Amino acid sequence: MLPDYDLLFADQAEKYDRFIAAEDYEGNLLQALRRIGRLNREQAVADLGTGTGRIAFLVAPIVRHVYGIEPVGGMRSLAESKKQKLGVKNVDFLPGEHRDIPLPDHSIDLITEGWAFLHAFSCTYPEWRTEFDAIARETKRILRPGGAVIYVETMGSLHLWDEPPARTALLYDYFEKELGLSKTVIRTDYKFASIEDAVDLGTFFFGDEVGGEIRQIGEATVPEATALWHGRIERWRKR
């Protein structure tokens, strides 16, 4: 049985943060973000669905400023706490939705999103197009001329996908065929402190079936593939 992700995000931010801390132990995501986003000190970045600030904190040392946009109060509170502990000065966490971003027109050089859009897609399916056309309008509104996006989503955990499941493919095809984004796939394997930790946190996020498989395999390292869709969305037109 899969978790209720809305309740998980609202009530269990600390355990969620422990879970994502184990992901991408080889550091491939930051390398890909630096290369694809051409990160530099001149950029203002908006990280949509920032959660507890994972991508925001990754890119903050490299760019001018990051705005982490997150609708869930518990996630923002933990992100703020981490910000204070880390002494980070150039990140602001703001309440907001993907389709209603609290930033001025043409104020952002790069928009990032990590593992939030697939959740939004699932919550709004089968009316997901209305949601994502609204997101596309908002991203075009806040991006400066020449600005770009990087959308980060899963390509399978424990069992890596050659092709995404049919329903998930609808969203990924939208990124590529309608927004005109390119795709880069990387490995972001999890490395937990122990097998017990892998089972506990894997069950917490992926559900009982995956947790049971992790226990049966008996490894603290769990494979994962991640795709980054990136580019400008100038090809997209309002309907």
Image (tube, rainbow, N blue to C red):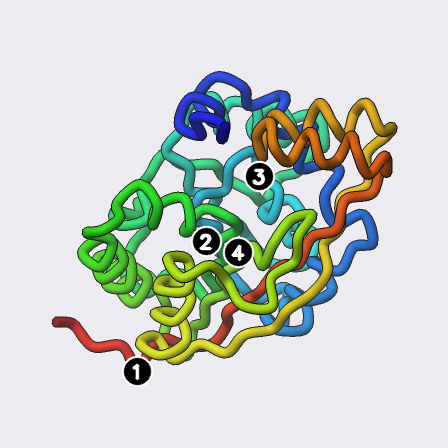
Residue located at (72% from left, 32% from top): 86
Q: Residue at x 34, y 69 (%)?
A: 174
Q: Earlier in the sequence, mark 4 or mark 2?
A: 2
- Identify residue for label 1: 235
Q: Amino acid at mark 4?
A: Glu
- Asked if the residues shown at circle 2 and circle 1 are in contact, with their CB atoms under 8 angstroms apart, the answer is no
- Circles 4, 1 touching at the beta carbon (< 8 Å): no
Badge 4 density bin: few <14, some 14–19, many ≥20, Cα 10 Å? many
Whether residue 65 is situated above or below residue 229 in the rendered picture: above
Would residue 121 appear left or right of 128 to someone viewing this image?
right
Left or right: residue 128 compared with residue 94: left
Q: Residues within 10 Å of mark 3 (few under 14, many from 20)?
A: many
Q: Earlier in the sequence, mark 3 or mark 2?
A: 2
Dot 4 corresponds to which residue?
Answer: 153
Q: Position of residue 152 (x, y in %)?
A: 54, 58
Q: Mark 1 or mark 3, which is nearer to you? A: 1
Q: CA distance from mark 4 to mark 3?
A: 16 Å
Type of amino acid under label 1 = Arg
- Give left or right: position of 122 versus 25: left
Label 4, label 2: how far apart the Cα atoms are: 17 Å
Whichever of labels 2 and 1 marks the residue nearer the N terminus, that label is 2
| Quarter placement of the C terminus | bottom left
Q: Earlier in the sequence, mark 4 or mark 3?
A: 3
Disc 4 and disc 1: Cα gap in Å?
A: 21 Å
Marking on residue 53 = 3
Packing grade of label 2 (10 A; few <14, some 14-19, many >=20) is: many
- Look at mark 2 in the image and give the residue it sits on: 46
Q: Position of residue 10 (x, y in %)?
A: 44, 22
Question: Between residues 205 and 84, which one lies in front from this camera angle?
Answer: 205
Q: Is residue 172 above or below residue 48?
A: below
